[in-house]
Amino acid sequence: MGAELVLYIAAIAAMLLAVAAQIKVKTTFNKYSRVPTRSGRTAYEVAEMILRSNGIFDVRIERVSGSLTDHYDPRSKVLRLSDTVYQSTSAAAVGVAAHEAGHAVQYARGYFPVKLRSALVPAASLSSRFTWILLMAGIAIMILGNTVIGFYVAIGGIALFALATLFELVTLPCEFDASRRAMAALGSSGWFAPDELRGSRRVLTAAALTYVAALAVSAIHLLRLLLYVVRIAGRGNRR
């Protein structure tokens, strides 16, 4: 079995994993959204508790429309909780709010992976805009006969795609660490019993799988693009 066929099969498997991960996180969230915690603490209160207990007083908590649109914006120092999370007392909502508060703690503590991820944001944005332009241009130039110039233009596109893949890689420890901080904070708060936190943990575990799948898809596509460009360049050199 050739390398190209192996990567093709791996790409299909990775994309199926990504779809399955998205379905898993939605079904898990929906399941534990119907499981209220006994303390009656809302997700907003949980996020506020984690921020304050870590000495963070300059981060606002706001409500944002949608479902699973929760995120922390480090530029404006705003923790945004979705409609389905903000006032909910469910195990799912509590876990999500604690996770996003965990990101705020990462920035406050200068957690290196999250600093590196922030530094890579402009490169990832550049990649999404110019990767395919450079790749298509490079391949076209090689097909038209200038293999050397076309190859280096295409490699420039692949380098940009590699930066996007690096961004996905750096995202993993940020997400895992935010979930670790979240579960530790929930466990030590005294607000929740261990059996209640199982639902929160399952929601965060399902969410983490989506980032693993995204990295797998990106890495396999990177290898496929590199192999494709090298193969076209090799044909040009044999002319």
Image (tube, rainbow, N blue to C red):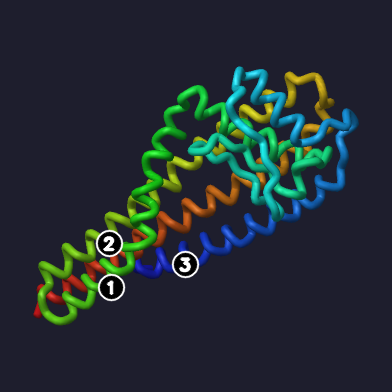
Judging by the rendered image, the residue that carries numbered circle 3 is: 9
Where is residue 113? Give x, y as percent.
Answer: 44, 33
62 or 39: nearer the viewer: 62
64 or 116: nearer the viewer: 64
Question: What residue is drawn where x is 10% and y is 67%?
Answer: 148
Query: Which is more N-terminal, label 3 or label 2?
Result: 3
* Residue contact at pointers 3 and 1, CB within 8 angstroms: no
Q: Secondary structure at mark 3?
A: helix
Q: Residues within 10 Å of mark 2 (few under 14, many from 20)?
A: many
Question: What residue is drawn where x is 47% and y is 51%?
Answer: 215
Where is residue 11? Give x, y as percent.
Answer: 46, 64
Q: Secondary structure at mark 2?
A: helix
Question: What residue is drawn where x is 37% and y is 43%?
Answer: 120
Q: Specify the amino acid type for callout 3.
A: Ile
Q: Quadrant of the N terminus?
A: bottom left
Q: Specify the amino acid type for callout 1.
A: Met
Q: Specify the amino acid type for callout 2.
A: Gly
Q: Nearer the viewer, mark 3 or mark 1?
A: 1
Mark number, residue 157: 2
Residue 116 falls in image quadrant: top left
Question: What residue is drawn where x is 69% and y is 40%?
Answer: 96
Where is residue 202? Give x, y as percent.
Answer: 72, 41
Q: Is residue 226 left or right of residue 195?
A: left
* Residue contact at pointers 2 and 1, CB within 8 angstroms: yes
Q: Is residue 180 left or right of residue 165?
A: right
Residue 157 falls in image quadrant: bottom left
Note whether 118 is above or below 109 in the view shown: below
18 or 75: nearer the viewer: 75
Which residue appears farthest toward the right when viewing the image?
Answer: 38
Judging by the rendered image, the residue that carries numbered circle 1 is: 136
Query: Which is more N-terminal, label 1 or label 2?
Result: 1
